[in-house]
Image (cartoon, grey):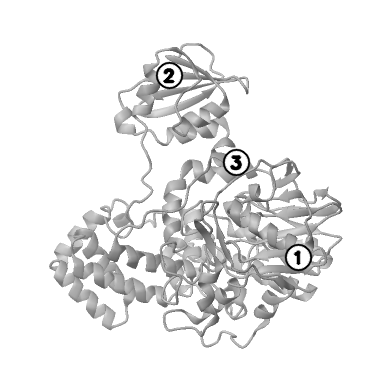
Amino acid sequence: MADLPFHDKGDFVDADRGFVAKLSPAVIKTADGRVIWDNDSYDFLQGECPDSAHPSLWRQSQLCARQGLYEVAEGIYQVRGLDLSNMTLVEGERGVLVIDPLISTECAAAALKLYRAHRGDRPVTGVVYTHSHVDHFGGVRGVTDGDVPILAPAGFMDHAVAENVYAGPAMTRRAVYMYGFALPRAPEGQIGCGLGLTTSTGTVSLLSPTLDVTRTGQEETVDGIRMVFQLTPGAEAPAEMTFLFPDHRALCLAENATHNQHNVLTLRGATVRDARAWARYLDEALALFADRADVAFASHHWPTWGRDGIVRFLGQQRDLYAYLHDQTVRLLNKGLTGAEIAEVLHLPPELEQSWHARGYYGSLSHNAKAVYQRYLGWFDGNPAHLWEHPPRESALRYVDCLGGGSAVVAFARRYIDENDLRFAAQLLNHAVFADEGNKEARDLLAEVYTRLGHGAENAAWRNFYLMGALELSEGIVPASVETSSFDLLSVLSVEQIFDSLAIRVDGPRAWHERLSIDWHLSDLGERHRTTLSNGALIHQREPADESADLTLRLTKEQLVGLVAGKGVGGVEREGDTAALQRLVAVLDRPAPDFAIVTA
């Protein structure tokens, strides 16, 4: 860390450049008064770095805490610090084009209000979603009711809702750890997440795009604003795009190049991203746009100005993901496992000393493991790891071999004294999983997690450690964020709606049930069949016969309402009405507050 260029204040200059005005107070509430965003709670970051934080992460959080309206280029403005992401506004002939309207409608509305207070009451004449993550579309109803062009990359709708259909509850629970939702905003608590400060917790919405961007080089004009697009699927998001404003000489990088090392696999959980493709897209962006841009900005952090700065920034970001990918693959082909690669992989000196390559959000350690996972999966080839006991059963056996819970705690104290906190955490984790009532082990593990968190340069690691310590001490913290909204449910395809039912079937309870239901969707003119067989709910579109046990005639909106638990009012039923009750009887509910640091 001594080699990091703390004397270089260039990022602070760029983060403050173009400042127009702050939101004061920077507290955003729902209509009923619930606080869903509070930038002011991070005012403590203006002070010196304490012993309870890594100096490099403290610096990053100081930069992320800057909030307000900023001019990026003539006619282009950003509102930063009012959610995890930035909202960009581009002035057109009649109004303003909004790029990435944040997570929550309340935050997006506040951002638009701040912009209008200083640039006039311009109508929103278009929206662009850069990619399919919720912090880039969730607040859209805070800026428009949908009577404007909405542009998005090809595949946006499928991917925007897919996470909520399949693994939303599990991802949300893990996000509580990743973003440190329950931690105090304080020098010893949550100080940010690297990509920003945290996520807002307001109303999530979604309006369907009216125009898909389907190819690199595609040009579109909205309200007189010209845009040239580059599609970048499968890198930072499954559906994503960067684009140039040629008349402004400004390049929007979406989230493909930000001022930190990003995640190849986010710790909240997702599919593994393609670091190789990521690097190639950045190289393509350099070739397409570097000579045509005077400023590059993203949906997080602050812009980069000047051709030389843009070329250096994009080139180093490209090299970062290429090096990470290629060196991990080189080492896995020498027989190293993901964990072993993470221990020996180091960045070249130029990247190591570049602030925007530091692991504040992603990390070299967990990104290397992600690349390994992408190619070789969870199994490292060692047969001892092929059929291991689950955590609690392993813990019971380890604790027994080590002489009991008290002996494990004693061993852990020895490793703590030797400053091997990593192994102390492993030992104490076994002690806690073997006996959740072992208060000495729980308290000591909480202390170890706290020390690991305070020493972490990576904000997500810090939050995971500190949340683990909190829940060991105080119990499970209920999730305060929603995994979906009615807007998100409403835009699911019919296939996705039935998928959402299929993954809720409690297989063993349904082993001996066999039933079929036809769903006639009158507004779509479609017929779908679901068949429960061997504990699996099978979906067919336009079945060839009329042999279902029950036929339901309804609209898609009624289907969404039924899945959301609003009942079957107004739905026409023909046949064995008990079939629907039998299906509902085998549906399980997710457990949004499952244990993580205890068995």
Q: CA distance from mark 2 to mark 3?
A: 27 Å
Give SS at disc 3.
helix
Image quarter where the C terminus lies is bottom left
Q: Residues within 10 Å of mark 3 (few under 14, many from 20)?
A: some
Image coordinates of residue 522 in percent, x first then y, are 60, 19
Query: Tag 1: Cα neighbours inside 10 Å, few (<14), some, or many (≥20)?
Result: few
Residue visible at 47% across and 64% down in the picture: 366
Q: Amino acid at mark 2?
A: Ser
Are the residues tagged 2 and 3 within 8 Å (C-beta)?
no
Identity of the residue furthest to the front in this view: 32
Q: Which residue is mark 2?
A: 516
Between disc 3 and disc 1, the foreground one is: 1
The residue tagged with tag 2: helix, strand or loop?
strand
Q: Is residue 252 visible?
A: no
Q: Position of residue 584 (x, y in %)?
A: 38, 27
The residue tagged 3 is: 158
Image quadrant in which you'd find residue 336: bottom left
Q: Which residue is mark 1?
A: 118
Q: In the rendered view, would you say 547 is above or below 33? A: above
Tag 2 and tag 1, C-beta contact below 8 Å: no
Point out the residue furthest to the left here. Answer: 403
Measured in 3D between alpha carbons, the distance from the residue under mark 2 to the one under mark 1, in whole angstroms, is 60 Å
